[in-house]
Image (spheres, rainbow, N blue to C red):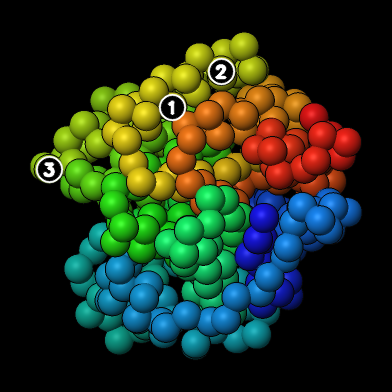
Amino acid sequence: MKVYYSDVEQPYHPRRSFFCGRFTAYPDVPGRTRSILAALEGHPAAFQPERPAPVEPALLERVHGRGYLEALAAVCARLKPDEEFFPFHQQRLPLLLESPYPRLRAGYYAVDGSMPLLAQSYAVASAVAATAVAGAQALRAGTGLAYALPRPPGHHAGRQSYGGYCLINHAALAAELLTDAGKVAILDVDYHHGNGTQDIFWERDDVLYASLHCRPEEAYPYIAGTAEEAGGGRGAGCNLNVPLGGGTDWAAYAPALETALEAVARFDPATVVVSLGFDTLATDPIGTFALVPADFAEMARRIAALGKPLLIVQEGGYDVPALGACALSFFGGLGVLPPSEDTA
Ligand code: Q9C
Ligand code: ZN
């Protein structure tokens, strides 16, 4: 299986997150991708790491507004090295877009204050989108399975909004490119609801967004992820949220996964994009679910049973030392490892 990654992200390390009046250590650290890649490197016959070439910047406009992309690029270009910029205003105020201070424009597009912008933020987030684009191209060329490992992650980034450590929505970009060859289902198993992905495809009937996540009453992003959100316009019925409570273990997760998989099977997509988060792990420092690494193998077996071409796109997961084992378990469940090396 091809593993698309980028080392552009390794020096990218925001230090602080902001939540409810406090700064905390930023969980999306460079060690996340290193932990996963190191584990996969132990099985060279199964995983072929590859660094894809950069993509045309205009490609990002298939899922993001040009004004959004230009404003973020402009704000980042003006930041000092090592400056961590948290926008002051965080709301859709039209006046912010007219301000002579370019930094105020970032606030217009921010859904929350959890993440700072750094001078490299836009360049890194847009460069690693190449991993998802390469994955989509591999599927278009007939590959049945590929893995994209972007950092920062993407599913909280909407068409014109950023937050939750995400600026560019990599899974959405891959899904959008794959719609050129038929319907696409996005199955989001990150602990958090992918409000950005939901936003991007809200009115689309050629993309199903199905998400299992901790319910918005108790978890980020708080503003989206209820079961009532089912899509709008032509896209009505093409959005499925399965919110779960804190403490969810495999016994409670498995039937919810079946519900989402049944919806995916009914939709009958040409391809499936999986937004894969390991923050459902019991030991995750920000999630409150109770999955164990072996559960990811069973999750993967059930996803593989769809019998569809799969593009796996990494989202969250913050228990850094555990991420490698989670990835080996998941890909073992997909049948990527020979039985003798299957860790699950
Ligand atoms: N205590 C992803 O997993 N943190 N993003 C809010 C709440 C934001 C997570 C703090 C979590 C974003 C891709
Ligand atoms: Zn998450």
Instruction: Determine if residue 209 is in view.
Output: yes
Out of 44 and 149, give the one closest to the viewer. 44
Residue neighbourhood size for the residue with mark 1, other residues' Cα within 10 Å, grouped as few (<14), some (14–19), many (≥20):
some
SS class, disc 2: helix
Q: Name the residue that disc number 3 marks.
A: 234
Instruction: Determine if residue 119 is in view.
Output: no
Instruction: Tell me where residue 52 appears, x and y as whole percent.
Output: 60, 75
Give the tally of numbered discs: 3
Residue drawn where x is 29% and y is 33% of the image: 267
Residue neighbourhood size for the residue with mark 3, other residues' Cα within 10 Å, grouped as few (<14), some (14–19), many (≥20):
few
Which of marks 3 and 1 precedes in the sequence?
3
Q: Amino acid at mark 2?
A: Ala
Which image quarter holds the C terminus?
top right
Q: Amino acid at mark 3?
A: Arg
Q: CA distance from mark 2 to mark 3?
A: 30 Å
Q: CA distance from mark 2 to mark 1?
A: 10 Å
Report if the CB atoms under discs 1 and 3 are less than 8 Å apart. no
SS class, disc 3: helix
Queried on whether the Cβ of the residue with tag 3 lies below 8 angstroms from ligand 1, the answer reads no
Residue neighbourhood size for the residue with mark 2, other residues' Cα within 10 Å, grouped as few (<14), some (14–19), many (≥20):
some
Please identify the quarter of the rendering in which residue 252 is found: top right
Q: Compared with residue 253, is residue 287 higher up or lower down, i.e. above or below?
A: below
Which image quarter holds the N terminus?
bottom right
Residue drawn where x is 64% and y is 17% of the image: 250
Q: Name the residue that disc number 1 marks.
A: 261
Residue drawn where x is 49% and y is 87% of the image: 77
Which of marks 3 and 2 precedes in the sequence?
3
Which of marks 1 and 2 precedes in the sequence?
2
The label number, if any, that marks residue 254 in the structure image: 2
Instruction: Tell me where residue 265 appears, x and y as whole percent.
Output: 37, 29
